[in-house]
Image: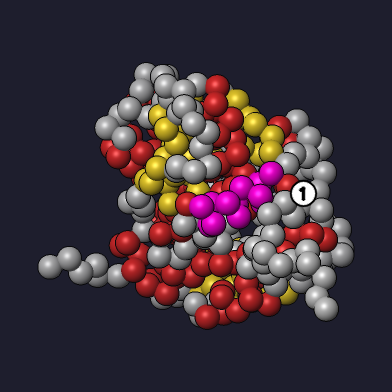
Amino acid sequence: MQIADHVVDLIGNTPLVRLHSVVGAGDAVVAAKLEYLNPGGSAKDRIAVKMIDAAEQSGLLRPGGTIIEPTSGNTGVGLALVAQQRGYRCIFVCPDKVSEDKRNVLRAYGADVVVCPTAVPPDHPDSYYSVSDRLVRETPGGWKPDQYSNPAGPASHYATTGPEIWRDTDGRVTHFVAGVGTGGTITGAGRYLKEVSGGAVRVIGADPEGSVYSGGTGRPYLVEGVGEDFWPAAYDRTVPDEIIAVSDADSFDLTRRLAREEGLLVGGSCGMAVVAALEVARRDPDALIVVLLPDGGRGYLSKIFNDDWMRSYGFLRRPLDPNANVPTV
Ligand code: PMP
């Protein structure tokens, strides 16, 4: 019988699917790795299980302990799934700009959510960084995974994501494209693919215009989960061969096309990564490109998939509502 013992055992082994209509005629094969098919809905399930395993082994996390992390989204869901299985409590700290829906997802999995004001500097005692550090100090058995510096993040992608891509392409992958947030995905999976291929696989990062990875200063952008205004320890900048900067407008337009034309309802960082993958596909028609799509699109219905929101930023190129621009009588 094929019955998993626990939902945590279903993390990883996500499938590849070929993209068609968004890829130019005569361009390379582009295969998308669907991380939203992880049980918590994102690639972050992978790092959650590995970070918790490592903390249990090193004694930082003990039975009955509490996991405390500043996160508003995917990492929180992953940590909450594993915490449930193993009897840990979770406290997630998030800024008040995070939508009520996202906070409720974390609460639904049994986590406590502490909300902090967005409009204070990081060193202010009420900032979400300060509050999470204080909670770790004051909570007996408290442990902060810190996905930005935890080596188990990249290690999880080295151990699972990279080998899955190599296996599922029969070793024929030539390019790996992924968005860069903490840098864990590109560092871990990219390093594995370079090693196993003797340096033949090219690793390409996708980054929002304005973020440090593509030479920006941290200027604000709207695509979520990727780009930074500092250099996290989880990112090894020697792994990517190239970083491609992508605008919010192009990221969101392609995200909408993935739902409309490819049947893939995914998040904005997925559209961003595919924009970069399509650039590589145009340049190198003989390539086999794998692009990682980190999460699903349901968390973005009121933004990327909302014509009014898209129009308010000047991003709307293809309305979802065909009558959108027709004045009602
Ligand atoms: N997309 C989304 C939606 C994410 O949440 C993340 C993680 N921050 C990424 C992309 C980037 O992954 P990584 O942190 O491994 O660089």
Q: Residue at coordinates 46% horizontally, 73% vertically from top-left? A: 88
Horizontal and vertical percent for residue 289? 44, 32
Seen in the picture, residue 286 relative to 153 is either above or below; the reply is above
The quarter of the picture where the C terminus appears is bottom right
Q: How many marks?
A: 1
**Residue 196, visible in the rendered structure:** yes
Horizontal and vertical percent for residue 319? 69, 60
Color theme of the render: secondary structure
Residue toward you, 80 or 171? 171
- Helix, strand or loop: magenta stretch: helix
Q: Residue at coordinates 62% horizontally, 72% vertically from top-left? A: 102
- Mark 1: few/some/many CA within 10 Å (<14, 14-19, 20+): some
Name the kind of residue labelled 1 in the image.
Answer: Tyr
SS category of the residue bearing label 1: loop
**Residue 191, visible in the rendered structure:** no
Magenta-highlighted residues: 250-261
Residue toward you, 29 or 196? 29
Residue toward you, 169 or 249? 249
The quarter of the picture where the N terminus appears is bottom left
Seen in the picture, residue 145 relative to 64 is either above or below; the reply is above
User: Which residue, given by chain and number where applicable, does mark 1 sit on?
Assistant: 221
